[in-house]
Amino acid sequence: MRSIYSFFYHTVAGWRIRDERPAGLDRYIVVVAPHTSNWDFLVGLCVRSIAHMSDAKYLAKQSLFKAPFGWVFRALGGYPVDRSKHSNLVDAVVAMFDRGEIKKIAITPEGTRGYQPNWKTGFHHIARKAGVPIILAGFDYPRKEVVISAPFELTEDTDADIERMKDWFRPLKGKHPELGIR
């Protein structure tokens, strides 16, 4: 599938990937932003395959996993999240890392395609508890580029780390820039 994704992504659509991950990194959380369009999912699938991250899973809203297409999202590595309940998602994902069920997982901290000034913080807690690094992956639609960072250095200060992440993402413009990070 990698060659098919690559053909459409690079040749037909004209996109490129700038990947700054070090070789040999096999366990991490991918923080994906800005998330402003449903097209982000398709672009992300291409990048996941081309950048040799095919084993990366992702979290998505539970409604996507209902019939008739729920099986597709599961087959593509998705895990449903019920956003109406406060469940122990952080510990559940940490346990999946600990059991080796997942090695990589993509999370959109905005939690929605609309503008969201306050990011979800669960990904930060997961990374710290599971002892895995965070990689940033950003969509830049005007440049037709996806940028994948080297591991992002975490501190004990979740809010400060998120602000530094937002600073990294701000130059990147989603499909609908008005809905992106400000």
Image (spheres, rainbow, N blue to C red):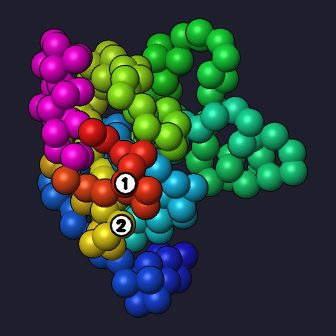
Depth check, front residue: 89 or 84: 84
Q: Quarter-wise, where is residue 131 in the image? A: top left
Q: Is 37 left, or right, of 115 in this rendering?
A: right
Q: Residue furthest right?
A: 68
Depth check, front residue: 14 or 71: 14
Q: Earlier in the sequence, mark 1 or mark 2?
A: 2
Depth check, front residue: 178 or 122: 178
Question: Identity of the amino acid at label 2?
Answer: Tyr
| Mark 2 lies on residue | 141
Q: Quadrant of the N terminus?
A: bottom right
Q: Residue furthest bottom?
A: 11
The structure residue drawn at horizontal position 31% and vertical position 23%, both measured from the top left corner, is: 124
Range of magenta residues:
152-170
By secondary structure, the bulk of the magenta-drawn segment is best described as: helix
Q: Quadrant of the C terminus?
A: top left
Dots 1, 2 in contact, CB < 8 A: yes
Residue 158: mark: none
The structure residue drawn at horizontal position 48% and vertical position 24%, both measured from the top left corner, is: 93
Q: Is residue 103 visible?
A: no
